[in-house]
Image: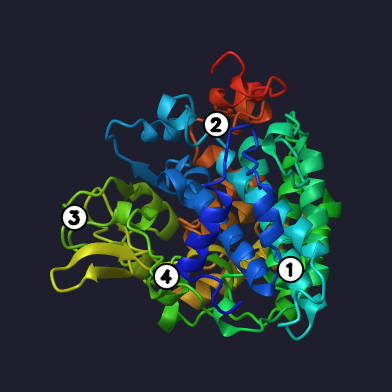
């Protein structure tokens, strides 16, 4: 899969998959006419192109509408950063109101995730049927098939995981339909069953994928067994804490599963934390600690001119921008996380700029490449979208320890991070209660994982949302008012669909 992320292959597959659509139904299954079935799925190249397209669809789902991956995971926890008003209503999500028309028709619509899932189902169904003769140009046909199918299973599992955290119950489809007109209109499936499907897909994918890569060009930006284990660990912690929000007690069976999964990943994955001298390279991509990333590199002309990173930058970073970005870091966040006065933590120094004014910049994603370098025009950010990395998983070990009542182990993990990044670390004192250490843990997650699509979910799992998300009181949390509504447009095609419970009568 040396050319997995070359732009021409993705465009080619997009033409094959997307341009054949004949109708818009709930799950946006893409039809395949008889000619397509007869000429495609005949060679290893077809399978490679198909999985490349699957990654392209996943990336489109995550980057669509102001990089929705970060809107769901970070932006709605508004005391981390602020979205300024420009007339489109996007800033409304930071007040817990997801009913603005613009947001309903975009962020509340999960069609793009189902396009990704539909492609995964197509890949799984068709590559499974490919013969050794069709794959005679690869050294080991069965290993090749396993690799493609394993990646498609991972992409499907990751897509469902992203959706289950945003909507809870969602329709479950694992069948590749030849024609969407005859596909069933599915109701929403309970989130517990969705999470079981994610778990099963991960286990099956892990059996098919290895820890290493055959081609260096595939590393980090295609799935391997490490990617699967990272997803599994996050799934187990989400299920342990969010399957039943009437209680604040984590399910220790899933907590223990997360623990053993992370232990295996650390022991077998070969990942290492980025040295602090190369800290910023982590967010360009393909660093030693990267586990799974979406390729957005200008090396393959796949950088982004609309990355969330650009929303925080001003003319100091992009030549033709003005002085006031639409997004800015909340000054209180910097004070609460890092304290006042001289700050020596490298994450503060490398991730933020202009911290003394009232609208600090986040420069975590600021690897600017001009496609017109002579005039410094046509700026693109060449920063991969980091989905999973080693520091994330190592820090989750502290959360696991706290669910088990082990404050000393969590304290040591947090202090290891502070010592790594700060020559004058403000360590967590020994002997604190589990609750007090959890407060320190969520601060450390806020420093380590800022603007990586995790912060809101961290707050929900640990029940520390009340410290940051003022629109989410306990009563709304218990009613699952953190989930999004479903775009009403999707109901026109599917009478079996029901609105998210909290939003009944509000949308």
- 9 vs 25, left or right, is left
Q: Which residue is mark 1?
A: 262
Q: Nearer the viewer, residue 203 or 362?
A: 203
- First in sequence: mark 1 vs mark 3: 1
Residue 297 placement: quadrant: bottom left
Q: Can you give x and y, in whole percent of width and height, for residue 359 in the image?
A: 26, 49
- First in sequence: mark 2 vs mark 1: 1
Q: Residue furthest bottom?
A: 139
Quadrant assignment for the N terminus: bottom right
How many residues crowd mark 3 within 10 Å: few (<14), some (14–19), many (20+)?
A: some
Q: Which residue is mark 3?
A: 321
Quadrant assignment for the C terminus: top right
Regarding mark 4 in the picture, which secondary structure is present there? loop
How many residues crowd mark 2 within 10 Å: few (<14), some (14–19), many (20+)?
A: some
How many residues crowd mark 1 within 10 Å: few (<14), some (14–19), many (20+)?
A: many
Q: CA distance from mark 4 to mark 1?
A: 28 Å
Q: CA distance from mark 2 to mark 1?
A: 30 Å
Q: Can you give x and y, in whole percent of width and height, for residue 132 in the image?
A: 82, 76
Q: Which residue is mark 2?
A: 472
Camera-near label (2 vs 1) is 1
Disc 4 and disc 1 in contact, CB within 8 angstroms = no
Disc 1 and disc 3 in contact, CB within 8 angstroms = no
Q: Can you give x and y, in whole percent of width and height, for residue 145 in the image?
A: 77, 71
In the displayed structure, 415 sits above or below 243; it is below
Q: Residue furthest right?
A: 253
- First in sequence: mark 4 vs mark 3: 4
For the image, the number of numbered tags is 4
Residue 164 placement: quadrant: top right
- First in sequence: mark 2 vs mark 3: 3
Regarding mark 1 in the picture, which secondary structure is present there? helix
Which labelled disc corresponds to residue 297? 4
Q: Is residue 472 visible?
A: yes
């Amino acid at each position: 899969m040396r050319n997995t992320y070359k732009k021409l292959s993705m465009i080619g597959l997009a033409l094959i998959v997307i341009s054949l659509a004949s109708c818009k139904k709930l799950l946006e299954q893409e039809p395949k006419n008889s000619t397509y079935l007869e000429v495609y799925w005949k060679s290893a190249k077809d399978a490679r192109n198909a999985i490349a397209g699957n990654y392209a669809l996943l990336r489109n789902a995550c980057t669509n509408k102001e990089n929705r991956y970060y809107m769901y995971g970070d932006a709605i926890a508004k005391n981390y950063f602020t979205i300024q008003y420009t007339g489109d209503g996007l800033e409304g999500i930071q007040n817990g109101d997801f009913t603005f028309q613009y947001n309903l028709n975009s962020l509340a619509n999960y069609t793009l995730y189902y396009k990704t899932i539909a492609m995964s189902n197509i890949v799984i169904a068709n590559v499974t049927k490919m013969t050794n003769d069709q794959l005679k140009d690869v050294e080991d046909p069965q290993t090749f098939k396993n690799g493609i199918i394993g990646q498609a299973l991972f992409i499907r599992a990751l897509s469902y995981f992203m959706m289950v955290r945003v909507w809870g119950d969602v329709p479950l489809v694992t069948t590749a339909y030849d024609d969407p007109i005859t596909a069933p209109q599915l109701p929403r499936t309970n989130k517990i069953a969705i999470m079981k499907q994610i778990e099963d897909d991960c286990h099956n994918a892990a059996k098919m994928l290895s820890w290493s890569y055959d081609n260096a060009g595939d590393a980090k930006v295609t799935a391997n067994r490490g990617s699967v284990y990272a997803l599994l660990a996050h799934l187990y912690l989400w299920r342990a804490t969010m399957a039943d929000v009437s209680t604040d007690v984590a399910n220790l069976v899933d907590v223990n599963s997360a623990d053993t999964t992370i232990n295996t990943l650390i022991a077998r994955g070969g990942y290492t934390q980025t040295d602090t001298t190369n800290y910023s390279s982590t967010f360009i991509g393909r660093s030693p600690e990267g586990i799974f990333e979406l390729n957005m590199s200008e090396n393959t002309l796949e950088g982004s001119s609309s990355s969330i990173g650009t929303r925080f930058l001003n003319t100091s970073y992009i030549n033709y921008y003005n002085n006031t970005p639409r997004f800015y870091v909340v000054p209180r966040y910097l004070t609460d996380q890092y304290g006042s006065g001289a700050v020596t933590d490298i994450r503060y120094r490398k991730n933020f700029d202009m911290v003394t004014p009232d609208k600090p910049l986040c420069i975590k994603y600021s690897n600017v490449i001009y496609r017109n370098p002579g005039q410094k025009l046509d700026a693109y950010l060449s920063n991969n979208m980091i989905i999973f990395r080693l520091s994330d998983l190592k820090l989750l070990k502290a959360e696991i320890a706290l669910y088990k009542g082990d404050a000393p182990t969590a304290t040591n993990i947090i202090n290891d991070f502070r010592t790594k990044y700060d020559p004058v670390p403000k360590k967590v004192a020994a002997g604190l209660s589990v609750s007090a250490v959890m407060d320190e843990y969520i601060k450390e997650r806020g420093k380590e994982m800022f603007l990586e699509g995790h912060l809101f979910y961290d707050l929900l799992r640990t029940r520390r949302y009340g410290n940051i998300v003022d629109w989410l009181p306990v009563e709304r949390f218990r009613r699952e008012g953190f989930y999004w509504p479903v775009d009403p447009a999707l109901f026109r095609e599917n009478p079996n669909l029901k609105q998210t419970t909290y939003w009944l009568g509000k949308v």
